[in-house]
Image (cartoon, rainbow, N blue to C red):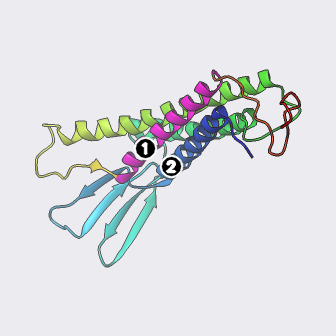
Amino acid sequence: MAWSFRGKVQLGGLLLSLLGWLCSCVTTVLPQWKTLNLELNEMETWIMGLWEACVNQEEVATACKAFESFLSLPQELQVARILMVASHGLGLLGFLLSGFGSECFQFHGIRWASKRRLCLLGGTLEVSASATTLIPVSWVAHATIRDFWDDSIPEIVPRWEFGDALFLGWAAGVFLALGGLLLIFSIFLEKEDVPSRGMVDPTAPLS
């Protein structure tokens, strides 16, 4: 199957959007949003996510406990839960709409103008999913930095630090944004009629 330049751009946008969506889903379920190392017991590490807190003891086991109340969470984690779940819905819907509107999937019942609208709407949803991923991840990171350098907390008290989930969340937001922008950019490209393999141009002179 021959691909036009616009089709290749759309395929790249779809793949980046799917990768970003998967990374965003993994970020949501990972408990490593914050990590805490105890100086008195270096073999014990605490981690906190959106849904549970865990303590990891080397050579022993990892014990986790889910948060019992949503209202008992810090404000940044409450907002992060809501926005991350919204990001999954926006990202999935945007991927499906963009897929129907792209050249990757041919549906004879969808006209060219309708496919452009679907691709534009899908790309916009992917950019929105990027925003609803980057905002909570960055907010949690900001709150972690703020508490880490809080002078009112005694120095002997351990401080929370960045967990691996934050870096994965930033990567997810970038992938979603790039995928959405590529999908939006593709609708401004000229439509190319790529002849199927084996077809002969009737106007071409016979040799």
Q: Quadrant of residue 100?
A: top right
Asked whether 36 or 172 is in front, the reply is 172
Horizontal and vertical percent position of residue 48: 37, 53
Instruction: Tell me where the magenta segment starts and ends, as one range.
Output: 164-188
Asked whether 102 or 25 is in front, the reply is 102
Amino acid type, callout 1: Ala
- Residue 171's tag is 1
**Residue 19 sits above or below residue 114 on the image:** below
Q: Is mark 1 in CB contact (under 8 Å) with mark 2? A: yes
Residue under numbered circle 2: 23
Q: Quadrant of residue 94?
A: top right
In reply to whether residue 167 is colored magenta, the answer given is yes
Q: Quadrant of residue 134?
A: top left
Q: Quadrant of the C terminus?
A: top right
Answer few, some or many: residues within 10 Å of disc 2's Cα (few below 14, many 20 plus, some between 14 and 19).
many
Q: Main secondary structure of the magenta part?
A: helix
Earlier residue among tags 1 and 2 = 2
Amino acid type, callout 2: Cys
Q: CA distance from mark 1 to mark 2?
A: 8 Å
Q: Give the side of residue 22 with respect to residue 62, left or right.
A: right
Tag 1 secondary structure: helix
